[in-house]
Amino acid sequence: MASYCACHKNDVFVTLSGIEIDEAMEVGRKIYQSSQERGLRDYRKFKGNGWVDPDGERLQALGSVAERAAAKALGLEWTAWYDTFKRPDLHHNIEVRMMGVNRYGLRVYDRDHDSKRVVGIVIERGREAGPYRIPGWINAVHGKRPEYLMDPLGRGQPVFAVPQYRLHHLSVLMDLIEAEQRNEVLS
């Protein structure tokens, strides 16, 4: 079984301005509202025990903040995409996952294409204005290990929770992106 604790060996910190946070929160709210209007599944609602998370919109907005912070840390354009639920969060096949507690593992889902690059951003309650800690990233294929599989809420929806000490430094991903950009120019 994997051990879960905060690991700071790969930490990168990023700060967003108040305007950047507000813009990201607004995009997150639009994403949430659009998904509700379209009747898409809300992973924050747990019908089995009758409990509904009132923070669904807030968490979606913070997810957009996480995407904006990751884009800034990687030197990428923030896409602010919405109504594109099959598209990666950022260019270069990057998924961004908010980690709501400092010690949590980085979530990788079985449905994540193996080629996805999953970046974790820690945004704990009470620290929504940053700075944001990025403990690292992993290719989805490498995060789908049996020892990381868990169903923390007992809902029959397992997730791979990659311990922070197994994540790669953001600079490795930045080097991959730079190489891809060079190849695009040469093509």
Image: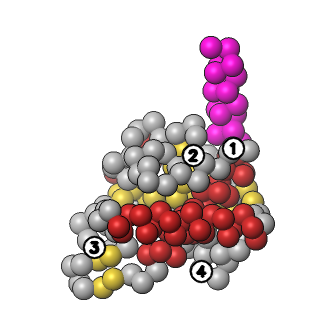
Residue 107 horizontal/vertical position (percent): 45, 58
Q: CA distance from mark 2 to mark 1?
A: 8 Å
Disc 4 residue type?
Answer: Arg
How many badges with numbers are in the image? 4
Q: Most extreme residue toward the top, as rendered? A: 187
User: Residue drawn at (67%, 27%), measured in percent from left and top?
Assistant: 181
Q: CA distance from mark 2 to mark 3?
A: 30 Å
Disc 1 residue type?
Answer: Leu
Q: Nearer the viewer, mark 4 or mark 2?
A: 2
Mark with earlier residue (4, 3) = 4
**Residue 30 included in the magenta stretch of the image:** no
User: Residue drawn at (47%, 74%), measured in percent from left and top?
Assistant: 57
- Residue hosting label 3: 154
Q: Quadrant of the N terminus?
A: bottom left
Q: Which residues are magenta?
A: 171-187
Secondary element at image label 4: loop
